[in-house]
Image (tube, rainbow, N blue to C red):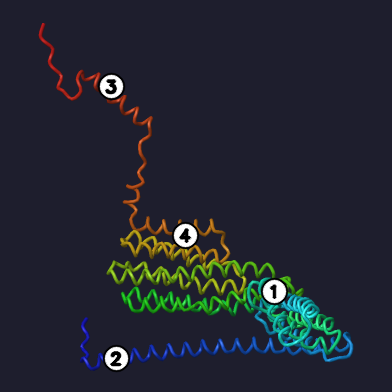
Amino acid sequence: MTDDRPPADRGQSRLDETAERTVRRVRHRGGQAGRIRARQWEVTLVISIQAGLAAAIAALLAKNLLGPGSHVFAPAAAVGTIATAIGQRARRTFELLGGVALGIIIGDTLRFLLGSGPWQTGAVVALAIAAALLVAGRGGALVGQAGGTAVLIATLAPMERGLELPRIFDALVGGVVGLVVVALLLPINPMRVLDRAAAPIFAILCEQLAELARAMRERNGDRTLKVLERLRGTEGDLGRLHDALSGAEEVVTIAPARWHRRQQYHRYARSAGHLERLLLDSRAMARWSSTALQYDEPIPPELPDAISRLGQAVAEMRVECRVGDDPLRTRRLVEECAELAGRASASGVRSFGESLVTGLRTSASDLLRAAGCEPEDANRIVRRAAGAGEAETHPPIRRQLHRARPTRAARARRRAHLAARVRNDGRAGLPARERPAR
């Protein structure tokens, strides 16, 4: 049916649709930004409370255990341990202690050999920083503490005796207090941190796979390119997921209250690896879809349907994994995705369409692995479903292609039968001559 509206009305309708899509996009981004800010506020509150509690405990212990004096470095070391990135606190504590020890050794040795003064201070700091970089291989707490301790030893040790031992004990008390606060008093929930870090990746995958399916149905190459760009812009989300994995591993390692989460953490870590591969597979599918549309290749309707099923399976897997259920609905949707991909392959696709089918099968296998399936089982499930889809589309051709060849015994029986017929007829293929009359 043709559109009876005048051109001005059609143009106005397109403008309204564009404005509506823009409003929806802005609302979605605003809601996503609000959720990110809420998560940041919660993390900020937890770290602030941990740092304040660690500083108070470190100052109290330093005052009561280390004797009189201004034990400034104990609370400073505790705050430095807490404020570092989650997942690096234990390593930072050891680097802090190592840097203090290295700075004291180099500072005392060079002060004894070179004496005190401005150029001696510069030489001490330079050698302490060089030694720390050689030990650590990069910048960090070890290098900073080695340089800072070397400065203190070179400048204050001539005027204040016995500065070395309090510095070491201050660093030890502050670092230990920071770890105790993180591990015992206020340990974070590792699974909650992981779930919140993975939530943006799940949301992007579900949203962009659905958008890719719609763009494929409409043969809109511009929209597939936008999907590709959106999937490429997930490096920040992947980085936050890796940080959350590191932090959760630290918590389940050093916090006794979270040791019962170790098995759940390792299962989540394996799923996160497959989820990252699924994101890479989705990028490849968006690229192949754009290229297939650019070359005007045929797009069977089963292809966008399979992509849509894959997005639904991603959403279903997150729900089932959060509640701890067996991924039965995820497996059913993945089987439907692979079956539709098999039908699309049998319906007739060209080179980039075939690459898209391969990407769908790979993504389906990675999704099953993320849901907890073993690699062999995931590949077998996808292969069987795709084969069923191909057989359902072209069963006679498949029977003809896979027709069994006759065995050697059957060929021998056939040759023997033909030889017997030749002997009975006298001459093979020639009419029998009449006997002469006697």
**CA separation, marks 3 and 1?**
97 Å
Q: Nearer the viewer, mark 3 or mark 1?
A: 1
In the image, which disc is placed on residue 131? 1
Residue on which disc 3 sits = 420
Secondary structure beneath label 2: helix
Q: Nearer the viewer, mark 1 or mark 2?
A: 1
Any part of residue 299 in sight? yes
Residue contact between numbered discs 4 and 3, judged by CB atoms under 8 Å: no
Q: Earlier in the sequence, mark 3 or mark 2?
A: 2
Q: Nearer the viewer, mark 3 or mark 2?
A: 2
Q: Nearer the viewer, residue 229 or 412?
A: 229
Q: Amino acid at mark 3?
A: Ala
> Which residue is found at the position 63% from the left and 79% from the top?
193
Secondary structure beneath label 4: helix
Residue on which disc 2 sits = 13
**CA separation, marks 4 and 3?**
52 Å
Where residue 145 appears, as percent x and y from the top left, is 72, 81
Q: Amino acid at mark 2?
A: Ser
Q: Earlier in the sequence, mark 3 or mark 1?
A: 1
Mark 3 neighbour density, 10 Å: few (under 14) some (14–19) many (20 or more): few
Secondary structure beneath label 3: helix
Q: Quadrant of residue 136?
A: bottom right
Residue contact between numbered discs 1 and 2, judged by CB atoms under 8 Å: no
Residue on which disc 4 sits = 382
Quadrant placement of the N terminus:
bottom left
Q: Amino acid at mark 1?
A: Ala
Q: Nearer the viewer, mark 1 or mark 4?
A: 1
